[in-house]
Image (cartoon, coloured by chain):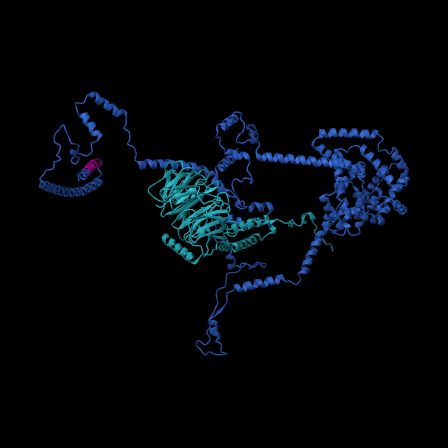
Chain colours: A cyan, B blue
Amino acid sequence: MKVKVLSRNPDDYVRETKHDIQRVPRNYDPSLHPFEVSREYTRALNATKLERVFAKPFLASLDGHRDGVNCLAKHTRSLSTLLSGSCDGEVKVWDLTKHECVRTLQAHGGFVRGMVVRYCGNSFFTIGDDKTIKQWKMEAPGYGEEEEPLNTILGKTVFTGLDHHQKKGVFATCGQQVDIWDEQRSTPIRSFTWGVDSFSSVRFNPVETELLGSCASDRSIVLYDMRESTPLKKVIMTMRTNTLCWNPMEAYCFTCANEDYNLYTYDMRHLEKPIKVHMDHVSAVLDVDYSPTGQEFVSASFDKTIRIFSKDDGHSREVYHTKRMQHVICIKWSADNKYILSGSDEMNIRLWKANAAEKLGVLAPREREAVNYSQKLKEKFQHHPQIRRIARHRHLPKNIYHQKNELRIMKEARRR
Amino acid sequence: MARVSRKNGNKKKLKGRCNVPLVGLGDQQLLYEEEEEEDSIDGGEEDINSSEEDEVEHERKRQKLLEGISTLGGKRKRAQGERSEAAVHMSEFSVNTDGGPGKVKMSDLIGIFEKNPAVPAKSRRQLKNLRRVKKSIDSPLSKEETEKIQRDMAFQKAASEVSRWDSIITQNQRAKQLLFPLSQEPAGPRPVERLVTGWNVQTPLEQEIFALLSANKQPFTDPILTPAEEASVRAMSLEEAKIRRAELQKARALQSYYEAKARRDRKIKSKKYHKVQTKAKRKEFLKHFEQMVKTDPAAALQELNKMELARMQERMSLKHQNSSKWAKSKAIMAKYDEEARKAMQQQLEMNRQLTQKLVTPLNDDYEQDEGDAGETDLLPDFVNDAVDGRDASNPWMKGKLTEEPTQKQLNDTMTEAAQVVSTVAAEEEELEAEETEEEALLREFDSNRKLHLAQESDIAGDVFLEEMTDDRAAAEDSEVSDCLSEFTIISRGREKSFKDTEVFNCADFTDGSAQLEERLVRIRTVEDLELLHHDPSAEPRHPPTAKDPPSEEKHMGKSKKKKKGIELKEVLTKETNVIKVPLSPTATDSDDPESKLDQRELIKEAFAGDDVISSFLKDKRRHEDEGKPKVIDLTLPGWGEWGGMGLKPPKRKRKRFRVKSAPPPPRKDQHLPSVIISEKRNTSLSLHQVHSLPFPFEDHGQFESCIRSPLGRTWNTERTVKNVTKPRVVTQLGAIISPMAEEELLKNKRAVAREGS
C-alpha cells in the first residue's frame, strides 16, 4: 500500500529561538469553522466571568486625618502626590505609591473648605472657615523652619469654594459672591453677584479657560466669563446643586451633582434642558469629578457609595462601597485615568481602581492583546442575557438596595 | 378713590367706542353679549360709587373732628389754604395735588402754549419744526434691564466662542480609537529654545540687543533656526524628512555591503569560483537579454552587436583552441589522465560556447517547449541527500544536508552500476581520434534521438500513452530540425551536479518510482537551485537508451577495467529507467480514485462495529412514539361493583372510560427517512439567546451579521485581529493627561485643511 506523508518546510513551523512563540498555521476558510460563533460566545462568557472574579477595585486606605476629609486636590505635575484637607483645618500631603502621609500642616481654624494646586505644581491654595485664603509651598519646610504660608489674604466673608486658572496666575473663590483674584493682589480683580446668594462651589473650565461655573444655594447654576463684568447665564433647578465639574475634553459640557440624587450633564449653550440625567444614587450627590479622558465621571454620594458613569449613559457602570466607608464628601479621578480617590466622613481617604478588573502595572504585549480581545468579545456579546446578567451583577449593601427599590417604585407610581 | 373712578370711566368710554363698530357690522349676537357684559360692569360700578360716597362722608366727619380738636388747643394752626387766586408769594408746600387732574405732562404745557394767543407766531413755528425734526430721547433703561441685556450679549459671545470646539468633539466621539495624553511630548529635558520662549525682555540693554537681532532677522526665540532655515524646515515635514533619511541610510548601508562583498570577492583566489561566477553572470545576462528582446528591441540589438563582436574576437584568437603550451602538454597527458582530458574538453567547450551564434528569439519557443518537457526530470543537487537518515520523505529537509553524504552515495552507486557504463564515451574518443569530441557527441545525440522518436511512436500505445500527447510528439518532430542548436545547449551545461542527479535516479529506481516523481514535482515548484536552470536540457527525452545498440553493451565489459569519470554518453546509456520520470505524475493521477476507494474501505473497516444507521432509525422511532398521544385510562376499580384484590373492572367499563385523544398532525419528517425534525423548543438554549433586537441595531440582519463575524485569531489574520480588537481609549502608563488645549484646535484645523486639499 502506498503511504502518503505530509511534508512541510521546517521554516514554517520551527522557531528560530526558544523564546519565540510557536507558530500555529491556520486555515481561515470559514467553511472549516462552523462553530465560530458558539466558540466565541463561550469565550465571551468566560471572559465576563473572569472579569467579575478579578473585580477587586479597592486598593488602599490612607488614614491619618483626625476629622472628616472635606476636600481633596490632585497635584498638577505629579501623579503620586495627593493633598487632603479635613474638617479640623488640617492639610495633609500624601505619597500615593507608598500610601503614607509625607507632610501635615495646620492650615486653618475650622474647616478647610477648598484646596487647589497651582498649575505649575510649586504651590497650593487653601481656603477655610477663618475667612482666609492661604498660599503654601509644595515642598515641606526645611529643618528648623516654621510651617508658614507664602501668602495670606484675609477676606470679608467665609469662602466656600476655590479653583485655579489653568494657565494664568488667577484663581476664583466663592462665598457670598464669586471673586476672581490675581495672585499678586490682595483684593479681587472682579466680583460677580446675581441676587444675594451664597455659593457652594466654583470651577474653572479647563478647556475654555476663561469660563467659570458656580453653584448657588438658591438652587441655581451660574456661568461666568472672567473677561466680562456680568455673569453669563443662570439656570435654576428643582433642588440645590452641590458641585459641578467641567468635561476636560469637551469645552461646553459640564456635569453637576444635585441634591435630588441625580447628576445632570449640561451643554452650556443650551441650559434649558440637560443633555443627560444620570440616576442611580439613593441620596444626595456630594461631589463629581471627570476622568481626564472625558469619557466618564465619578460621583460621591451621601448614600456612602461611589458610582462611575459613562458621560452618555443614564445609569452607572460601576458602584463602589465598603462596610466602613461613610458619607463620601469628596472624590477625584487621578490624572492618569487609572485610579479614583475618595475622601469620606470617617477620616479616611480611599484609593480605588477606575476599572475594577484591570490588571495594574505593565502588561506584556500578548497579555494586552488578550485583554483587548476579551474586551471586544464582551462588547460583542453584551446583549446576550447570560453575559449581561453576569456583567451587570453588583453587590449592594442592604439598605441601599432597598432604598433603590423604593425609589424605583416611587418613580413608576409617579409615571402612572 | 378718584383714580379708581377714573379708570372705570375710561372703561366705560372704551366700551362705548367698541359698540359702535359692532353695531355697524350688524352682528346682533355679539352686540348682545357685549351689552350684557357692560351691564354687569355698570352694576359693579354703581356699587363702587355708593361706597365711595360713604367714604367721603366719613372723611368730612373726621376732618371736622380734627378741627375741633385743634381748636381745643387755643392756638389755631395756620391753614394750608387752597390756592384760589394768583399771588406774588406762593408757598411750595401749599401745592395740593389731590384734587388736580394728576401729573402735569409736557404735552399739556405745550398745548397751553399753542392755545395762548399771546405767544408769538415765530416761536410757535419753531416749536412745530422742532417737533417735526427731532425725536425725543428715550428715557434710560433701568439698571436691571441693562444688566440683563449685557448678560445676554456676553452669553451669546461665550456660546459662539465655545462652539468652535464642536467639530473636534464630534470627531472624537466618532473616532474608533482615542489616544491619551493628546500631546505626547517626549520625556526628558526640554531643549533650551523652548525654555527661552517664555522669557521677556526687561532691561534696556536687552531691549537694544533684541532690537538689533530683530532688525537683522536673527532668531532670538529659537536660537537655532533663522527664518530661512525655518522656511526650509516647513517645506519638508518631519515625516517626509524621516522617510527620506531612512531611505538614504538604507541606500548607504546597501552600498557599503555591496562594496564589502565585492572586496571579498576580489580576494578569492579560487579560479573555479570565478569561473562559476562569470558563467552565472553570462546566464543572467542571457536571461535579461531575452527579456530585453521583448521589451526594448533597440537596446537588445546593441547588445547583440556587442556579443557578435566578442564572438568574432574569440573566433580570431587562438584562445581556448587547445593550441597553447598548456593545452599541448595536456594533450599528451590526455590519453592517460582523465583530469587532463576533462580540462581539454572544457576548453573546447568554452570555445564553442563563445563562438556559438546567438539563438534568435525564433528558436526560443521551441526551446521553451523542450525545456518544459525536459525540466520535469531534472533533479537538483540536493536530491541526492535523500538517503540521509533524518527524514527521507520530506523534500524540504534535503536542502539542508551537507555535501558529504552525497559524495559517498555517488561513489557507492558508481561502484554498483553507473560507472560501468560511463567509460563508453572515453572508448569512443579513443577510437575516433580525428574527430573532435563535440562532433562525436553531437552525432551520437542525433542518432539517439532519431532512434528514440521511432521507438516512441511504437511504444506510445502501452507505456507513454498518457503522458506523451500527440502534439508534444509533433513538437519534437519539428525539433529534430533544430536539434543541433539544442544539443549544443545541452552539452553546454554539463556539470557534476547533473551527473549526481543521474546517479541518484538510478539508485532510487530500486525503491519505487512514485516517491521520486512526487519529489520532482515539489522541487520544481520551489526552484531551490540555480544549477537546475543552467541546463534546461532534454535529457529525459532520450529513452531510447533502453534499446541502445548492443555494441555499446559489449563495450561495457571492457570499460569495467578502466577507471573513468562520467561522460555525456554514459549518462545517456544510464537513462534507460529515467525515461519514466515525466510519466509519473499522470500515473499517480490515475491512481487516485483507487486510493480513494481504498480509503473508504479503510474507514469502513475501522468503524465496523458501529451501526449508525440502525441506531438513527431507533432514535427516530423513539421520537415518533413520544409524539403519539397516550390513551388515558380513567376506570375506577370498585366503582359501582365489587372491588378488591384480583378483581378487574369489567371490559365494558374499561372500554367506556378509556379516553383516546385525537391523532396529532402528521410529522414533518414522515417522508424524510434520514431526518429527525423535532418541533419542541429547547428551553436550555433560549437561556442564552437574545430575544429582542438590542438598541443600536436597526434590523435583525444587522445584528446577526455582527454576531456572525468572528474577532479571534483563530478565524482572522493577525492584522485583522489587531484592527478589530483595538481598544477605544488608550492611555499611556504613568502619563498625566492634561485637558484639551487650544493646540488641538489648530491641529484639527490643519488636518481638516489637509483632507480638503
Task: In this rendered view, identify the residue nearer to me: B640 or B626.
Answer: B626
Q: Percent from the top left, x then y, of residue B507?
A: 80, 49
Q: Percent from the top left, x then y, of residue B607?
A: 66, 61
Quarter occupied by residue A405: bottom left
Q: Quadrant of the N terminus of chain B?
A: top left
**Above or below — where is B612 with respect to B60?**
below
Q: Percent from the top left, x then y, of residue B333?
A: 90, 39
Position of B756 with respect to B480 (left or right) is left
Position of A27 with respect to A134 (left or right) is right
Q: Note whether residue B432 is visible.
A: no
Membership of B13 in magenta stretch:
yes
State whether the magenta stretch is mostly helix, strand or loop.
helix
Membership of A306 in magenta stretch:
no
Tell me which segment is drawn in magenta.
B9-24
Q: Note whether residue B34 is visible.
A: yes
Total marks placed: 0
**In the current view of this chain or complex, which residue is farthest to the top?**
B122
Quarter occupied by residue B351: top right
Task: In this rendered view, identify the residue nearer to me: B192 or A1.
Answer: B192
**In the current view of this chain or complex, which residue is farthest to the front?**
A144
**Above or below — where is A74 with respect to B21?**
below
Task: In this rendered view, identify the residue nearer to me: B412 or B466.
Answer: B412
Q: Percent from the top left, x then y, of residue B286?
A: 75, 34
